[in-house]
Image (tube, coloured by chain):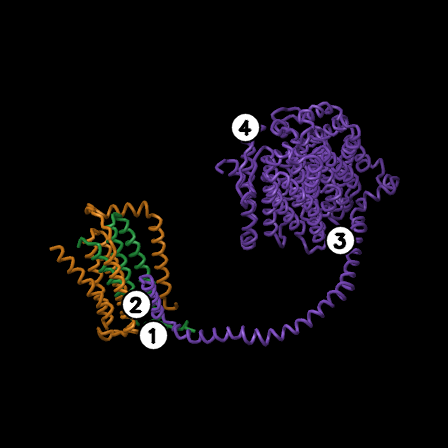
Chain colours: A green, B purple, C orange
Amino acid sequence: MDQLVNYLYISAILFSLGLFGVITRRNGIAVLMGVELILNAANINFVAFSRFGGMNVSGHVFSLFVIVLAAAEAAVALAIIITIYNSMQTVNVDDASRLKH
Amino acid sequence: MDNIYINSSLAILFLPLLAFTIQIFIGKRLPRQGDWVSISAILFTLLLAGYMFISMLAQYDPNFRYESSFTWMDLGDFKIRLGFLVDNITIIMLLVVALISSCTHIFSIKYLDGDIRYSRYYAYLGLFTFSMNGIVLANNLVSMYIFWELVGVSSYLLIGHWFEKESAANAAKKAFLTNRVGDIGFFIGIMTVFTAVGSFAFTDIFEGVALGSIEGATLTFAGICLFAGAMGKSSQFPLHIWLPDAMEGPTPVSALMHAATMVAAGVYLSVRLFPLMTPDALTFIAYIGGFTAFFAATIALTQNDIKKVLAYSTVSQLGYMILAVGTGVYTAAFFHLLTHAMFKANLFYGSGSVIHSMHHALHKKHDHDTDPQDMRNMGGFKEKMPITFWSMTISTLAIAGVPFFSGFLSKDAILGGTLSFAQNHPQHFLLPIFGFGAAAMTAFYMFRMIFMTFYGPSKMPEIYDDIHESPREMTGPLVLLGTLSIFVFYTLPYFNPFSTHGWFTDLIVAKDSFVPGNISAHEIAEHAHHAHMPAMILSLSVAGIGILLAGLMYLKKILSADTWAKNSGPLYKLSLNKFYFDENYDRFLYQPLMKFADKVAYFDWELYDKYFINGFGKVTSWLSNISGKFDYEGIDQGLVDGVGRSAKNVGHSLRNIQTGRIQNYILYVLAGAILMIIIQAV
Amino acid sequence: MSELAFWLVAAITVVSAGMVVFSGQLIYSAIALLFTLLGVAGLYIFLWADFMAGIQVMVYIGGILVLIIFGIMLTHKIESVKISQTNVQRKIGAFVVAVFLLFLASSLGSAPWFQMVTTEPSETVSTVGKLLMTKYLLPFEVASILLLGSLIGAAMLSRKEG
C-alpha cells in the first residue's frame, strides 16, 4: 500500500477493462459504464501521483474536475440514449447507424 | 496608453464607430430606427471632448502635447508606426467635430423625419464622425491618409443619401472623383516624404526637414503634392467644383461636412504640415487660397439658390484659411476654421430650417414644382421664423466681419497677416486685393441672402400663411451655434472685442518652420501686429460698403439689382453660370479625353485585336490541336486515368474498413497505438 | 493488517470491474459497478484522499450510478431482472486489449518511479476548498457553467417532442 506502482497496476487494469467494455458492449448503457471505469482509472492515477509525487492536493482538484465532467457526460449520454430509444426502440449503439454512408 | 487624454480620445474615436456598427446591422429593428443610439454615442463624445477642452483650459499650457504610438507593420528594418497625437489643436478640433456633429444629429431628428433610410443616415453620420476624429488624432501621414479616404467615402454616401434623384447620385460621384484627384497628389506627397525621411510620423518628418534630409525643390514638390490633398478636400480652385454640387445632400449633412468639419480637414492638414512648407510652396498655397476666396465670392454674388450661396461662401472662406496658411499666419487660419465652423454650420442649419418650412408649405399646397431652395420664392419670413432669423443674422454678421462677432476676430487676423506679407513682399500685392475684395463681396452676398429671405414682401403670398418656425430639435442647435458666434467666447479671459488676443492665441502659438532659412514665427507675428490696425480699418470699411450696397439693392430697392446686372454685361452671366467651370471641364477635359479614348479603342479593336491578336489566336489554335491529341491519348488515358483507376480500386477495398461503427474505430485506434509502441520498442 | 485490507480492496475493485464488462446481464453489471466505485473510494482512503473518497461515494454512487440504473429501467421493458445484452468483436477485442495491458504493465514495471516521502496531511478538505477558490477559480466556474449546460442539454434532449 505504500508503493506507487501498485496503484498504477490497479488503474491500468481498470483502464483496460473499461476499454474492453467500450469496444465490445452493444448496449449503450453498458458502453457508458466502460467509460466510467476509464475515468475512474484516470482518477486513481491523479490521486496516486498527488500523494507520491509531492503535489499536495492539486491532483485531488484535478480528479474533482474529472468527476464533474463524468457527471455531466453521464447526464447527456443517458439523455441521448433515451432519445435514441424513444425514436428507434433500441439502445444498441450499432443499430443507431443512420449516418453511415 | 494609460494616459487619460489618450484614453478619452480613443473613446471619442471609437464610440461613433460603435454607433455606426449598431445602426448598420440592427438599426432598422430598433425603436425609432435607433436614432437614440447614435445620438447618445455622439453626446457622450461631446461630453468627453468638452472634458478634454476644459482640462486643456485648466492647464493653459501652449506646449501641452501627448503622443502614443504602436508598431503597425514590422518587416525587419522597415517599420511603420501608427499612433495618436493629442495637443491643443487636436483638442479644439475634437470639440468642434463633436459639437457640430451632435448638433447635426439632433437637427436631423426632425429634418429627416420619416425618411426611408433614416437609420442608415445616422449610421453614415457615425462613420463620418469616426473618420473625421481619426484625421484629427493621427500623428502620422499613413493613418491620416486612411481616415482621409474614409471621410471621402462617408461624404460620398451622405451626398448620395437620396440617390433616387439622379442629380444627387451624380453629385456624390463628382465629389468622390474630384477628391480622388487631390488624394493622388496627397499620396505622391506622402511617398516623396517617406522616401526621403523614412518615416510617416509628423515629428520624424519635421526632424528630417530640419536636418536637411529633404530640401529644396524636392521639399517644395512634396509640400505642393501634400497640399493637393488639402485642395481636394477643402475644395480649392481648381478642384472646387464638387462642393456646390454636394449641396444635393441633406442640409444637416451640408452643415456638418461641407461647412464645418470635412472641408476643414484640408485646412487642418495644411496647418499641421505648415512647418515643412518651403517659401515657394507657401507662395503657391497663398495664391491658390487667395484666388479661391476671391473667385468663389464673385460666383456667390449672383446665385439664387440659398444653399448654393452658402456653398460658394464656404469655398471662399476656405480660401481665406488657405491664404492665411500661405502667408504664414497659420494659427489665424486655424482660428478662422474654429469660428467659421460655428457660424457657417449655423447658417446651414438656418437655411435647412427655412427649406424645411418652405418644403412643408409647398407640400400642403401640393406644389411639387416650385424649388423650395430658391430665394426668389421667399421673402418676409422674419415674422414667421424669428429664431431662425435672429440666429442667421448673428452668423451673417459674424461672416461679414462685423465687430463684436467671432468672424471679425479671425478674419481680421488673416487679413492683417496678408497685408503684412504684401508689405514685406511688394511683388505679391494681389493677395491683399483678393482678401479685401472677397471680404467686401462676402458682406454683400450674405446680406443679400438675408434680405431676400427674411425681409420685404413675400414673393409667394399663397404659401406665406403656411410658413412656420421649425420644431425645437431644429431651433436648439440654431440658438446654440448662434450664441457661439459672438466674440466673448473667443476672447476670454480678456474682454477686448477688437483684439484676437484670448485663450486661443495663448494656447495655439505658431511654431517656427522647420525649413532652414524660413522666416521665424516671431517675425511673422511681429509684422502681422504692425499691419493689424490698417487691416482692421480696411476690412471694416469694405464690409460696410458691402452691407450698404446689399441694403440699398435688396432692402430699400433704391438701386435696381437688375439694372446693375444688365450694366455689368458678360460679367454677370459668367458669375451666374459659375464661370462655366463645369462646362469647360466638360469641353476641355472630359470630351477630348473621350475622343482620345475612342481613338485608342479604334486602334485597339480594328488593328491590334483583328490582326495581331486574332492571328496569334489562329496559330495557337493549330498548335493546341496537335498538343491536344498527345494530351488525350498519352497523358490522359495512360497517366492521369491510370492514377485515378488505381486510387479508385484501393479506395474500394479500403471502404470495407469504414463500417460506421464507433467501436470498430476505437479498436483500430487501439491497434494503431500498440503498433506504435512496438515500433518504438524495436 | 492495513496491507491486507489494501489488497482486499484492490481485489474487490478489479474483480467487480471485470464483472461490469463481462456480465451478460445489465443489472448485474450495474451492481458490480457499485462495488468497483466503492473499491476506488477505498483506494482513495489509502491514498490519504478522504475528501475524494467522500465525493466518489456521493457523486458516483449516489448520482451517476443511480442515473445509470434509471437509464436501464427506462429503456427496457421490465419483465424480469434478466436484461440480457450481447457483445460484439469479443475475441479480437479481448486480444487487442490484452496486448495493450501487457505493454502497459511491462512499461509500468520497468519504469524507475521516483517516489517522494511525504507525511499525511492533517486535513485535505479545507486545502482543496482554498485551492478551488484561489488557484483553480476559473476552471471551477467553467465547470459550473458546463454542469448548467449539460443540465439544460439533457433536459432538452430527453423531452418527448425532442
Query: Quick check: do tags 3 and 1 share a chain?
Result: no
The answer for which chain carries disc 2 is A
Q: Quadrant of the N terminus of chain A?
A: bottom left
Is residue B360 among the parts visible in the rendering?
Answer: no
Q: Nearer the viewer, residue B645 or B562?
A: B645
Q: Do the residues labelled 2 and 4 touch (CB within 8 Å)?
A: no
Identify which amino acid the numbered label 3 is placed on.
Asp
| Left or right of C90 in this view: B408 | right
Q: Do the residues labelled 3 and 2 touch (CB within 8 Å)?
A: no
Residue A90 rendering spot, x and y as whole percentages: 33, 74
Which residue carries the number 4 mark?
B59
Dot 4 alpha-carbon crowd within 10 angstroms: few under 14, some 14 to 19, many 20 or more: few
Which residue carries the number 2 mark?
A22
Q: Which of marks 2 and 1 is nearer the N terminus?
A: 2
Which residue carries the number 1 mark?
A89
What secondary structure is marked by label 3?
Answer: loop
Mark 4–mark 3 Cα distance, whole angstroms, equals 57 Å
Mark 1–mark 4 Cα distance, whole angstroms, equals 80 Å
Query: Quick check: do tags 2 and 4 share a chain?
Result: no
